Amino acid sequence: MSLTMHSFRPQAPPGRSQDAAPADLELLRGVARQDRAAFEQLYTRYHLRLTRFLMRLTDNYGTAEEVVNDTMFVVWQKAATFREGSAVSTWIIGIAYRRALKTLKQGDAARRNELSENELPVFDGAFGEEMSRDQRDWVLAGFAQLSLEHRMALLLTYYMGHSCEEIAAIADCPVNTVKTRLFHARARLRTLLPTLADPTPATAPTEPQP
């Protein structure tokens, strides 16, 4: 395999643009006033984005939808508490992050080694050349063995396009903790990928001699 960890690069996050922030803030101000129309617009803006993120962590659409709805319910309840010094997107994704951690750790959705190929869009376009099916399977096998926190750190960086500072706000942890998680996630993949690319064949058991 010719791919290395140096090949990874963050992508432009889905549904995120420079024009989104002012619109999001105006909508959230409306939600704080209990404006249902503003809430419906904000829900529509974030539903697909949050669902795509959550479906990278669980193949159970019902679980992802539950977390999205729980997240937006909190947004409806807590909109008036939002401090405008931070980005609305960071605040909303932070709520989703915490709800997802709680939900996935409690249920069977927080499983490993059961990810499908379709659950690896974090790496789509993250390489200079298109990956072959074998390469996707190879990276997938390594990604599936990471902890939930490490997978989330990689997803927020490489799929959602967030900086370490933004991820720290989302995860409610120090920036150094984010950097440490990314370091260990990448180091773990560096260790796993060569092994997965060239596994040592298992020795067939010998039949007992009479």
Image (cartoon, rainbow, N blue to C red):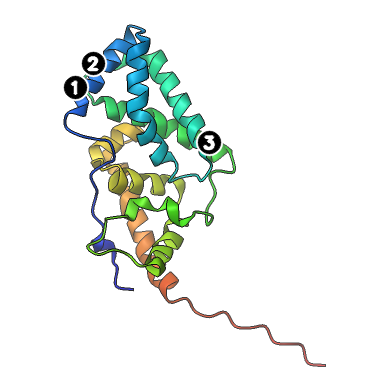
Q: Split into 4 quadrants, where in the image is the C terminus?
A: bottom right
C-alpha gap between disc 3 and disc 2: 30 Å
Q: Split into 4 quadrants, where in the image is the N terminus?
A: bottom left
User: Where is 86 relative to 149, above or below?
Assistant: above
Image-based side of 24 in relation to 71, left or right: left
The amino acid marked with disc number 3 is Thr
Tell me, for residue 186, which label it has, or none: none
C-alpha gap between disc 1 and disc 3: 30 Å
Name the spot of residue 84 as percent of width and height, x first.
22, 18
Can residue 35 be seen at all in this image of the molecule? yes
Query: What residue did someone put label 1 on?
Result: 22
Asked whether the beta carbons under mark 1 and mark 3 sit within 8 Å of each other, the answer is no
Query: What residue did someone put label 3 on?
Result: 63
Task: Pick whichever, 154 or 191, lies toward us.
Answer: 154
Image-based side of 171 in relation to 112, left or right: left
Query: Tag 3's secondary structure?
Result: helix
Name the spot of residue 34 as percent of width and height, x first.
36, 7
Query: What residue did someone put label 2 on?
Result: 26
The amino acid marked with disc number 1 is Pro
- Residue appearing at x 33%, y 22% in the figure: 42
Task: Pick whichever, 9 or 35, lies toward us.
Answer: 35
Name the spot of residue 176 as percent of width and height, x first.
28, 43
C-alpha gap between disc 2 and disc 1: 6 Å
- CA neighbours of label 1 inside 10 A, class few (<14), some (14 to 19), many (20+): few
Asked whether the beta carbons under mark 2 and mark 1 sit within 8 Å of each other, the answer is yes
Task: Pick whichever, 16 or 105, lies toward us.
Answer: 16
The amino acid marked with disc number 2 is Glu
Quarter of the view holding residue 46: top left
Quarter of the view holding residue 92: top left
- Residue appearing at x 29%, y 11% in the figure: 30
